[in-house]
Structure formats: structure tokens, C-alpha cells
Amino acid sequence: MAYFEQSDLEKWSRGEWVNTHSVPPIRGFSIDSRNVDSNEMFIALRSEKRDGHAFVGDAARRGASAALTEQFVPDAGIPQLKVKQGSRALQDIALNHRLRFKGSVVGVTGSCGKTSTKDLISLLLGEKRVLKTAGNFNNTLGVPLTLLRLDSEQHDFGVVEAGINTRDEMSELAGMIDPEIGVVTMIGRAHLEGLGSLDAVAKEKATLLTGRRQMHAVVYPLACHGYAAFKNLDHTTNRVLCPLGEWIPSDPWIQPVLYWSVSETRGRWSIFLQESGKPRRKFVVGNLSAGMRQNAALAILTASELGVSDADIQWRLMLWHPSANRGEVLQTENGWVYSDCYNANPDSMIDSLRAFEATFEPSYSRLYVLGSMHELGSDSAIYHEEVGSKLRLRACDRAICVGRDASAFFNGLVAAGNAPEQVALASTTDEIALLVSAFEGVVFLKGSRANRLERLIPENSTPIPSYP
């Protein structure tokens, strides 16, 4: 666990220690007084909903050894580092701590699959010496808290996820992460409500690849190259993943050409990578969606750039299984659940639908539970109709559309020729819980977080690490 000197914290935050002559060792940071541990600094943040200064005393009683505050809290009983702006000070402390980290940091972003790709890169690097983003700590508060857990004595690598939903947000995250290697999974139709267009999405994502240091490598698929933001990158570090057989523009941004392809045998996929003038490399993975196969190739490239051998990569690939609600398969009393409901946008929804239908035998009846996709802007209904139009329900199949855009899903399903009586609409998961639990066959769950579709998974379900 990293140790933080009193003088460093004061210098990095441009703050001033108040009401103390000495500060106990600081070995961690927390923004939640309920979860603070001994020898940690509590960060008192202000938001529209609450003022963290009201909880400094509670943090002290739970063992916090100091607090970072914007105004002195007289009755707290612990040393306080008084700063001008709490969240800015937290980010500055995190940046300075990251800069003294002796290992390599990988930054990961993208419109789809960034969390799974982050997890896969961490696995391929050898997880025991890797610090990775936990949970959804990928924003302007989560990223600094992640970076502050880096410890050069324990970690050779940090794999840090960056998630954004508004313009100019990535510049803050990229400035803190300052990666040696940057990875972008894809540019897709996500967070358009805050970003406005795919070009704006691309500009934000590409910002992660333009850190203050000379980057070791930037890794992304060829489709990203269609956006101007990616053509402006320093091409000497580009590692662009190009589908075999696709026409490749002859420009310096994608030289040398790095081809990739896949083939399937009995439920397992082989990923092939070949760079001009070098032998073809083969890696075998389990049953992954098309999007995750590409993400696996990006993760393999990243691990290779950081010195991991092909043999170690292959061994670790065989240990991979999806995280909870990210393409996870669970067995129930009545069949199976395919849970990919951590979040959703049109591109990830379509990729997940294809993976679901390829995973299970056609003999199973299918129940598609489609949760509304949020933050898509003024064209949201169009995107929901598009997703609905991708389904072809057989006589034994059913679909349930949930949430505020359920009717748009319905319109797309019916326009594609599906019978209206095979499709139900619901406002919340509570309305359909019994129906889903009683369904015999395989159930598909995907939608934005606000739908809370994971509540539809039966309590006695058993996760299956690798299916089939």
C-alpha cells in the first residue's frame, strides 16, 4: 500500500494543513465516510445533493487519520488539509502520485466494451502485479481514486478505464492517467445526448491517446481511422488493428499494417494476428461476441507491447470469463439467462443479440428482455426502432420491451414482421419479474443501468464461467 507524506500532499494540492503539528501516515483516500478505513484521508466534497464537510466528524470516528476540506471543520478532531477546491485537489494529488509510479499505465476507453477490455488486459498482464479500475470508478472522481491506489512496490502495471458523457471531460481524465499505452475499443452511438455526434465522440476518445509523455503505443481498430481525430495522432506509435481482406489506405498512420482475422471451431474462436514480414500468430479464445473478439485482439496487442510472451497470453486467455452482467451466462431452474445488462447503446445491443443467438441451441425458446437505452439524444426513438428491427421472433419466442422507450422497440419489432401479440411492454422490471422467472428456455437481458434488469435474474441462478 502506497504511503503519502504530509509535505507531498500539501505541495501537490496547493493547500495548507490546519490544526496539526504532525499527521499520521496516510495510506489511502475515501470520498465516503461510511467506508473510510484507518490511516485514510477523507475527501470532503460538495455536490448538489450533499456537503461532505458534514461527514468529516463521522469519518474521524470511523478511523480516518486526516481530511481534505475546503473549510475547516472545528469539531472533527483530526488534521485537515484545507484546499481551494476539493475535487481539483484530489485530481492534482492523483496526477502527482501517478507521475512517480515506476510501472506502466494503460488507459482504456471506447463506446462499447471498455470495462471488459480493461479486465482482459489486466488478466493478460498477470493480475497479481496489476492494479485495475474497480467497478465503475472511471469518471472524474473514480479515476483519481484508482490512481491513488497505485503502489510501485506491489504493481508493475496500472490498467485504468476512462468513461465520459460530456464534451471536454476526457481531457481531465487523460491528464491524470497520462498512459504509456492508450487503447480505444471502438467509436459508437453512446452518450450522444451529451456529446452530440459521432465525430465528437471520436474526438473525446482520441484525447486519451494524446498524453503529455511520448506514448509507447496507441492501440485501436481500423474503423476509428475514419474519424479526423485519429488521423491527427502521432502515427509513429499507432498499432491499428486491420481486418484481413479489407482495403487498407496507404498512409503512414497505419504502417506497418497489422492484420487480424478469426475462425470458429466447435464453439471456440481462433484469433490470428499478422504484421508485415512477421510470422502469423494464433490465439484461441472461448465463445465471445464479435465485438469481444475484436477487444480480445486489442488486449493481446497491448499485452505484447508490454512484453508478455505469446505462451503466457494464450494460457491466460483460457482463464477468461465475463464479469457479472457483461455477457454472463447463468443456469436457472427453467433454463438459462444471458445477462449483458450492465449498460447498453445501439451498437453493444446489436452485438449482444448476435452473441446470444449464437450461444444457445436453436431448440430453446427465447425470451428477449430489451431495456431502454439512455443518453442517445434526439434520435433515441430511431435507435430503439433499429434495435427492435434486428429481431426475428420464431413461434416459440417472446419479447418484452422495458422502460421509457419501450414503444420504440415495439415499433421496430413489428415493422420487421414480428407479430404484435408476441411482444409485451412494461414500464419497470417489477411488472415482469414473475413472467421472466417462469419462462422455460433462454432469457436475454440487456439495457441501460437505469432499468436494473439484473433484478430479473432468479436468486438461485448459478453463473457458468464458460458456456458452452
Image (cartoon, helix red, strand yellow):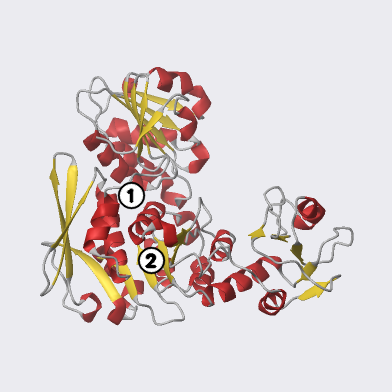
Q: Which residue is mark 1?
A: 347
Within 10 Å of the Cα at label 2, are there few (<14), some (14-19), or many (20+) other Cα atoms?
Answer: many
* Residue 189 position (above or below residue 267): below
Q: What residue sits 20% from the left and 23% below the top?
A: 363
Question: How far apart in space, not on screen, are marks 2 and 1 (Cα)?
Answer: 15 Å
Q: Is residue 97 left or right of residue 302?
A: right
Task: Locate the C terminus by quadrant.
Answer: top left
Determine the secondary structure under disc 2. helix
* Residue 409 position (above or below residue 245): above
Residue 132, position in %: x, y? 46, 58
Q: Is residue 399 left or right of residue 448?
A: left
- First in sequence: mark 2 vs mark 1: 2
Residue type at the position of mark 1: Asp
Task: Locate the N terminus by quadrant.
Answer: bottom right
Q: Is residue 74 left or right of residue 424?
A: right
Note whether residue 386 is visible.
no
Residue 191, position in %: x, y? 46, 55
Q: What residue sits 27% from the left and 36% below the top?
A: 467
* Residue 235 position (above or below residue 135): below
Residue 296, position in %: x, y? 28, 55
Residue 337, position in %: x, y? 36, 30
Q: Is residue 139 left or right of residue 73?
A: left
Residue type at the position of mark 2: Ala
Q: What residue sits 37% from the left and 61% below the top?
A: 198
Q: Which residue is mark 2?
A: 202
Q: Residue furthest front?
A: 153
Q: Nearer the viewer, residue 244 or 229?
A: 244
Note whether residue 468 is visible.
yes
Q: Quadrant of residue 407?
A: top left
